[in-house]
Amino acid sequence: MYQCRVPMSPHPFLNPNATITRKQRDALPFPLMLKKTPVIKNVFRQEYKDASYWAAVTSLSRLSSTPTTLSGPVVLEVVIAYERGRKIPDWDNAVAMLKAAIDGVTLAGFMKNDKQVIGMFMKQIKSISGEGYTDLTVRKATDEEINRTYT
């Protein structure tokens, strides 16, 4: 099982339903005011992926033994803590917003490929401290989770 804390929650622009207004574009702290929405979303997606990657690498480096990448079916356990003033999005939108974080921990070596994920538990909360963060745990799936059938 591998765990890390990403020191940010997904940016609101990563919501698949988010639109970026001219006013929001003008307020961005980087020179992308004239860029299209997909370009701006990509900047925030890359920022979240990088933050997740470095959080995972740091977590792996703290382990006493040499970490091995998880193979086989895995389950993700995620807690997204939103900073003060943020609305909590619908569950399905929050899952879509996590794509960059999942890619980051995969790149860091928590798992070989995100195709291994067979299930996910997610909780969305308001951060007590007011600062946003994302806790990610990747663990091997249990036999019950692997063999569960749905009718």
Image (cartoon, rainbow, N blue to C red):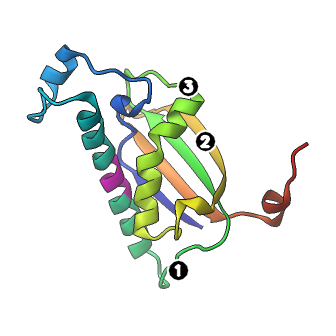
Marks 2/1 in contact by CB < 8 Å: the verdict is no
Q: Is residue 26 above or below residue 52?
A: above
- In the visual, does 150 lie left or right of 118? right
Q: Is residue 75 above or below residue 63?
A: above
- Of the numbered discs in the image, which one, if any, rests on residue 122? 2
Sort mark 3 into few (<14), some (14-19) or many (20+) by Cα contacts within 10 Å.
Answer: few
- Give the total of numbered labels: 3
Name the chief secondary structure element in magenta.
helix
CA separation in Å, label 2 and label 1: 25 Å
Give the residues drawn in magenta, as a range.
48-52
Residue type indicated by callout 3: Asp
Q: Residue furthest right?
A: 151
CA separation in Å, label 3 and label 1: 34 Å
User: Could you tell me which secondary element the residue under label 2 belongs to?
Assistant: strand
- Please state, as top left, top right, bottom left or bottom right, where the C terminus lies in the image: top right
User: Could you tell me which secondary element the residue under label 3 belongs to?
Assistant: loop
User: First in sequence: mark 2 or mark 3?
Assistant: 3
Marks 2/3 in contact by CB < 8 Å: the verdict is no
According to the picture, the residue beneath numbered tag 1 turns out to be 68
According to the picture, the residue beneath numbered tag 3 turns out to be 90
Please name the residue shown 79% across and 61% down the image: 146
Residue type indicated by callout 2: Met
- In the visual, does 74 lie left or right of 29? right
Residue type indicated by callout 1: Thr
- In the visual, does 107 lie left or right of 122? left
Closest to the observer, 70 or 6: 70
In the rendered image, residue 50 lying in the magenta stretch gets the answer yes
Closest to the observer, 77 or 25: 25
Q: Residue furthest left?
A: 31
- Give the image location of residue 83, x and y in percent: 38, 30
